[in-house]
Amino acid sequence: MSGKRDKASAEDLHVMDTVEQYETYEDYLDSQVTETDMYYLQDEDLARQLVELGYRGSGDTLQREEFEARKKALRERSTQKTNAPKQLSSSGKDLSASPFLLALGNREELVRNGKLTSIIFVRDVNSKGQEVSGYIDYAHRLRSTNFEPYFERRKKLMPRPTDLSYYNWETQTSTSTSTPNFQVIADGEAGLLFKNKRDRKVVNVDPKAPPGDNTTRTEIRTPEYRQVVIYDHMTRRKS
């Protein structure tokens, strides 16, 4: 009996983590739609319906009512917790010597509370002397990584193969990974694009093209890196 209870508890935790990860039920369905699905279906609503019916994705998709109920439970649980603000990782740190860290510190609170999403492009040399570059979802990294060592300059923020996009110029290793905030789109003509999962707006990182609606492009000149660019996207929830 204990083993069954442990299994049920683990499944419940997994479901709650899933519900917490996605802002809306549509975002949850979209996370299980693949590029192959869209290629053949050419219809976002149809792709979502197939996921909801269990014909795509994991096959054990939550129904809308269950998702909304669990979402409501999470919100109620959150309001019962202390209202004391969480200490920002950049709080109390002297960031004046690094324009890049200062820029990240200025954005941290807005990114953490969901009012802003930022994509960080970094190009530099890794610990093996290899030039690497990539696009980092700042909100996703903040949630999954302790940023204090970065703000204290004990660690250097570098792209990883698990980020939105990663490229090693020496080994020619290339990866792209969607996050809870952005879907990676490889467009043959426009190049690399990132679609915000909340408002469906596309961020274009081509320096010769406009960055997109509600998006600004800021190049940060900083001594620690060869190149840093931050794309700030003000998120607006779909009505």
Image: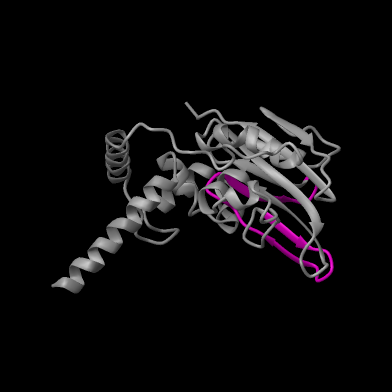
Quarter of the image with the N terminus is: bottom left
- Residue 153 at least partly seen: yes
Residue 187 lies in magenta, yes or no? yes
Indicate the position of residue 231 as horizontal and vertical percent values.
71, 37
Looking at the image, residue 136 sits to the left or right of residue 60; the answer is right
Indicate the position of residue 237 as horizontal and vertical percent values.
50, 29
Looking at the image, residue 198 sits to the left or right of residue 62; the answer is right
Q: Above or below — where is 121 with respect to 130? A: above
Residue 91, quarter of picture: top right
Q: Residue at x 16, y 72 (%)?
A: 2
Total labels drawn? 0
Foreground residue, 64 or 117? 117
Q: Residue at x 77, y 34 (%)?
A: 218
Foreground residue, 58 or 106? 106
In this picture, which residue range is highlighted in magenta?
165-190
Indicate the position of residue 59 as horizontal and vertical percent values.
38, 61
Residue 103 lies in magenta, yes or no? no
Indicate the position of residue 159 as horizontal and vertical percent values.
70, 56
